[in-house]
Each structure stands twice: as structure tokens, then as C-alpha cells.
Amino acid sequence: MEGKPGKLSILTNGIIKENPTLVLVLGTCPTLAVTTMAMNGIGMGAAATAVLVFSNILIAALKNIIPDKVRIPCYIVVIAALVTVVQLIVRAFAPEIDSALGIFLPLIVVNCIILGRAEMFAGKSGVFDSALDGVGMGIGFTLALTFIGSVRELIGSGSIFGYSIPFATNPMIIFLLAPGGFFVFGCTIALVNRLTKGGVKRKSFGCEGCPSAAACGRKQEGGCEA
């Protein structure tokens, strides 16, 4: 039987080994939509990290009193409340980020990274470990968005963090559009695989992590296909 992961392992898993964007391939929609600029990536990553950390803490603290049959609706209520708070803070102190992120800021509520960590980790772990998991996953998400946003902004706009780069002439606008986003996203995943020499394992989520497992007949047939 494998022992429980250490505190440092929990914190660092989300950065490379289980990076939510580049390894687990979660949250792809906001990743492609908001990464036209590096600053947008930081803004979305910071907002998602705040929601991740506090939702993990609250869910871990309340997991013993939340009825199992309604745990997913309860998780969503907690996440939605936190997203509302974060959105109001961003709107008050960083209106330009709020304007740039648009609808994707409130849509953090349905970001599968947030709900996935609540279901797979916070609902089964202690408060401190859940906080570490949220921080690690948030850092990994932020780094991925910032890197992709930096590449797309540099090639597509000839700037980085809003500052023009003298040698970046003839920017290719396609990198600011959906095809360019998919291309940079795919290349970034390939780069991670190359740097880790394929050592990053992609996790498959079995029946035990599925909210519909109790009502699914396939659980008795040997589980769902990966």
C-alpha cells in the first residue's frame, strides 16, 4: 500500500506532475480564451487560485457534515459564493483585468479544475493538505496560462505584458485567434512531455471519483473506461 504523500509533494504536484492544464488537460476553455495576453493569464490564474484555496479549505472543513448525496450541489454553492467575492474584488481593484477576462471570470464557478479538486482531494483530505493542494494547483494553472499568454502576445502582438518589443516585428495576428491558441497550447504540452521525457503520468479518473457512480450500472461491470 502506498503511503500518504508528503506536504511538499502535495504542494508541488500541481506545478508539473499533475499540472491541471498541461497534464490533466482541465480548464481548456478559459486557457484558450483569455491567454491573448500574459497579464490576462496572471489575472485568471490568480482568481482561480484564490477560489481553489478557499474552496478546498471550506470543503475539507465541512466534508463530515455535508450529506454524500448532495455533496456536488453543496460544493458548487461554496465555489459560487467564493467566485462572487473574487469577482467583486477584481472589479473594484483591477477593473481592467475584470474587463479583459469578461464572462470567463464568473465562469470559474463551473471550471472543472475547481470542482475536480473538491471532489478528488478536498472531500477526502484534511484542511491543511487541501489548502496546499489548492495553492499547488493554482500555481500550476497560473504558470501555464502566463506562459501560453506570453508566447501568444509576443508572436501575435509584438509585446510582452503590454510592453512593445523592438525586435518583434511583423506580428502574426493568428496567434491571438483560436487557431493560434490551440497551436501554442499543443506545443506547450509537447514541451512539458519533452522536458520530463514522458515521465509525467496522466491520471485517469475511475468510478470512485465520479459523482454519478452510485447510479451507474457500469460500476458493477468493472468500472468506466479511461
Image (cartoon, rainbow, N blue to C red):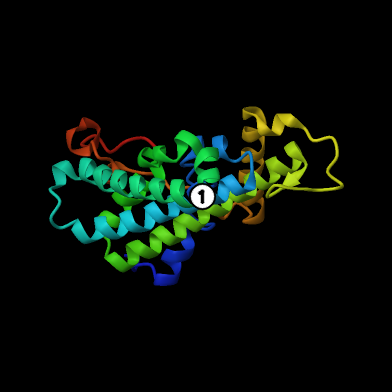
Residue in view at x 78 percent, y 42 percent: 158
Give the crowd class for mark 1: few <14, some 14-19, many >=20 residues within 10 Å.
few
Q: Position of residue 11 (x, y in %)?
A: 44, 65
Please, is residue 73 above or below residue 133 in the view? above
Residue in view at x 73 percent, y 30 percent: 173
Which structural element holds mark 1?
loop
Residue in view at x 23 percent, y 36 percent: 212
Q: Residue furthest front?
A: 92
Side of 98 relative to 67 (left or right)? right
Quarter of the view holding residue 177: top right
Residue in view at x 49 percent, y 36 percent: 102
Q: Is residue 162 visible?
A: yes
Q: Position of residue 69 (x, y in %)?
A: 14, 42
Side of 178 relative to 119 (left or right)? right
Q: Position of residue 9 (x, y in %)?
A: 44, 67
- Residue nearer the viewer, 53 or 37: 37
Please, is residue 155 above or below residue 3 in the view? above
Q: Is residue 200 visible?
A: no
Q: Which residue is mark 1?
A: 94
Label tally: 1
Q: Quadrant of the N terminus?
A: bottom left
- Identify which amino acid the numbered label 1 is placed on: Ala
Q: Position of residue 86 (x, y in %)?
A: 39, 50
Q: Quadrant of the C terminus?
A: top left
Quarter of the view holding residue 151: top right
Please, is residue 186 above or below residue 167 in the view? above
